Image: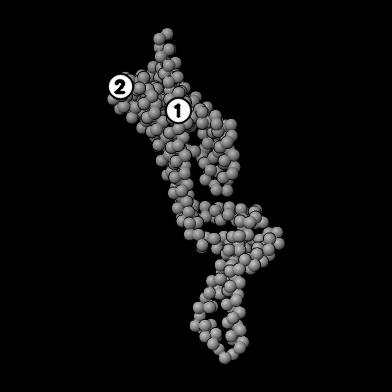
Amino acid sequence: MDLKLTNKNYVFLALIFLSIILWAYFLNETGLMLKEMLNLGELENVIGKLKSTAFLFFVFTFPISIALNVIHSKIEENKINSFIVGLGGTAIGLIVSMLLFSNLQGYLLVGVFYLIGRALTIELIYTKKLELKKYVSFRLLGTGIHRTGTILAIGLFLIIAITVNSNQEIYEQQIDQQLLEVAGGEQTTEQLTELFVDSMIETQKQTAQQIIELPQFQALENSPDPNAVAFHQAILIQKDYLNSIEYRQKIEEEISKKQNLGDNELQGVLDSVKQQMPVFGIMTDFLWLIMGFAFFSAVLLLSNTIFYVLVLVYGIIIEQIYEMTIKR
């Protein structure tokens, strides 16, 4: 089998390499790092970077290398040459990008899955292009972005799930810290006041109910001792008072007079909320699955929408330019 590369192969290899350097540059300019995106405390900062102009340019340039790879595999008869050009240009581009741009060094494992996606895409294209009769370019380009996007999504899910699961305690602390910071920063709002009052009144009501249900307490109602009867009546009146609007307003007024709740009080509120709402515990236990699925879904969404359209557009343009060059 002749493995000699032609000028066409070298041109596509160079273009794939340069296109990867291009989108890698814009990704680096966003400042987005995988470690940062996994830090719950950096969520606001990450969202700001996703809205940046640099990220927009990354989105528009990322599909170029995929389109180049697909079109080259379509026009190249020698599959081995296609692997050399596609994987060679991709691997060199990824390595050089990580050496040039410091923010991308944390994406090493993501790059491995990206490379695997390229290899599987090339193999699939050589199978499908023999079967397809109509709209070959469109369907191959769609196959290319879908396969690459799926492998990337699976790779990110595995990386994130393993990372989060192996650092479960750290992420639990981050969740607690975020909740405490929100509470501490907005403790004068009605939401926190209501939360604190609900927790305190509920505890008092439970205590009163436990006392009332005691046989010893119930026996006081018919006691010959007037003090015992008075105590019995006082507890019943207090229980009714706990359910009154007046008592709730009194507690809310006392809380609103405080400028800041102490850390212990805030932690107490947080613990109370967790006990009353088991969903918080479930979310913490399965955070690895939630975060992994979130990234998995985001990559698939991009692959099936914006990236899909851009790959089709870029691929057709590249193929037209190639055909015009051949005719000359």
Q: Earlier in the sequence, mark 1 or mark 2?
A: 2
Q: Position of 110 compared to 103: left or right?
A: left
Q: Position of 248 compared to 94: left or right?
A: right
Q: Residue furthest bottom?
A: 224
Residue in the picture at 43% in, 37% down:
300
Q: Residue 143, position in %: x, y?
A: 37, 29
Q: Residue 18, position in %: x, y?
A: 49, 24
Q: Nearer the viewer, residue 109 or 305?
A: 305
In what quadrant of the picture does the C terminus appear? top left
- The quadrant holding residue 184 is bottom right
> Tag 1's secondary structure?
helix
Q: Residue 150, position in %: x, y?
A: 40, 36
Q: Amino acid at mark 1?
A: Val
> Tag 2's secondary structure?
loop
Task: Point out which mark residue 129 bears.
Answer: none
Q: Residue 198, position in %: x, y?
A: 58, 63
- Around disc 1, counting alpha carbons within 10 Å, would you say few (fewer than 14), some (14 to 19), or many (20 or more)? some
- The quadrant holding residue 85 is top left
Q: Nearer the viewer, residue 96 or 64?
A: 64
Q: Nearer the viewer, residue 173 or 110?
A: 173
Mark 2 highlights which residue? 133
Q: Nearer the viewer, residue 274 or 178?
A: 274
Residue in the picture at 57% in, 36% down:
51
Q: In the displayed structure, would residue 259 be above or below residue 102?
A: below
Q: In the displayed structure, would residue 205 be above or below residue 217?
A: above
Mark 1 highlights which residue? 309
In what quadrant of the picture does the N terminus appear? top left
Q: Are marks 1 and 2 in contact (CB under 8 Å)?
A: no
Q: Amino acid at mark 2?
A: Lys
User: How far apart are labels 1 and 2 at the CA level?
Assistant: 21 Å
Q: How many marks?
A: 2
Residue in the picture at 60% in, 62% down:
196
